[in-house]
Image (tube, helix red, strand yellow):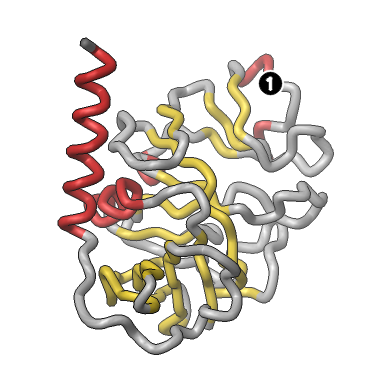
Amino acid sequence: MRRLVALLCAAACAGWAALVLAPIGAAAGAPWFANSVGNATQVVSVVSTGGSTARMDIYQRTAAGWQPLKTGIPTHVGSAGMAAQAKSGYPATPMGVYSLDSAFGTAPNPGGGLPYTQVGPNHWWNGDDHSPTFNTMQVCQKSQCRFNTAESENLQIPAYKHAVVMGVNKAKVPGGGAAFFFHTTNGGPTEGCVAIDDATLVQIMRWLRPGAVIAIAK
């Protein structure tokens, strides 16, 4: 019975997301990212509007071409704007195309197609360049963590009410940056993440499926 209820809930959530993120016009011509996203069919486009602000547009690829589902979403990026690549300790949002593989948040799972972790006080994102678990989520009490917590992020903060992990520095290269997320805005610049209002973020999370990407450019 519980499995049936869960399946019905999942179907309802997916249907709700489809209603919110429905095509808002005919298929568009090739958008700026078209030759950079491979076979992806879901793209979160982020284009700088200057400084630490940007515009976000949501696209779905169909048989008819790329269709915009939601456009002109006000977006905050790094306090240093955008940069050609990620760098540890530098608060700029890296340009490029990155996978959106998983999600987390202090709030319960809002639904959607990505794996989700509800985080608490013992959840960290390891920013210690010298740790073998650099640039991954870890669960430990602060005094028992096997990495430098001063260089890492505790994930129980308001900005992480909901967040999607951006696949930046998947190779875990020291100095190549860590903890880049698409998360709830606090109304100001980020340390290199991409942030929008929580209600819109939840709509997008419910729509996302494995294989989705975020494409970032000036």
**Does residue 96 appear left or right of residue 160 in this picture?**
right
**Does residue 90 appear left or right of residue 65 in this picture?**
right
Residue at the image position 54 percent from the left and 78 percent from the top: 217
Q: Is residue 92 visible?
A: no
Q: Which of 111 and 201 is in front in this view?
A: 111
Residue at the image position 27 percent from the left and 51 percent from the top: 198
Q: Name which quarter of the figure residue 108 lies in.
A: top left
Q: How crowded is mark 1: few (under 14 residues within 10 Å), some or many (20 or more)?
A: some
User: Mark 1 falls on what kind of element?
Assistant: loop
At which x and y percent is residue 100?
52, 52
Residue at the image position 43 percent from the left and 62 percent from the top: 42
Residue where numbered disc 1 is placed: 145
Q: Quadrant of the N terminus?
A: top left
Instruction: In the displayed orientation, state which residue is furthest to the top.
Output: 1
Residue at the image position 37 percent from the left and 62 percent from the top: 188
Q: Is residue 181 above or below residue 115?
A: below
Q: Which of 69 and 201 is in front in this view?
A: 69
What amino acid type is highlighted by mark number 1? Answer: Cys
Q: Which of 207 and 186 is in front in this view?
A: 207
Number of labels in the image equals 1
Q: In this view, does 146 lie above or below 128?
A: above
Q: Name which quarter of the figure residue 186 lies in.
A: bottom left
Q: In this view, does 135 lie above or below 184?
A: above
**Does residue 53 appear left or right of residue 133 in this picture?**
left
**Does residue 138 appear left or right of residue 5 in this picture?**
right
At which x and y percent is residue 27?
31, 81
Q: Is residue 108 visible?
A: yes
Q: Is residue 11 above or below residue 179?
A: above
At which x and y percent is residue 71?
28, 74
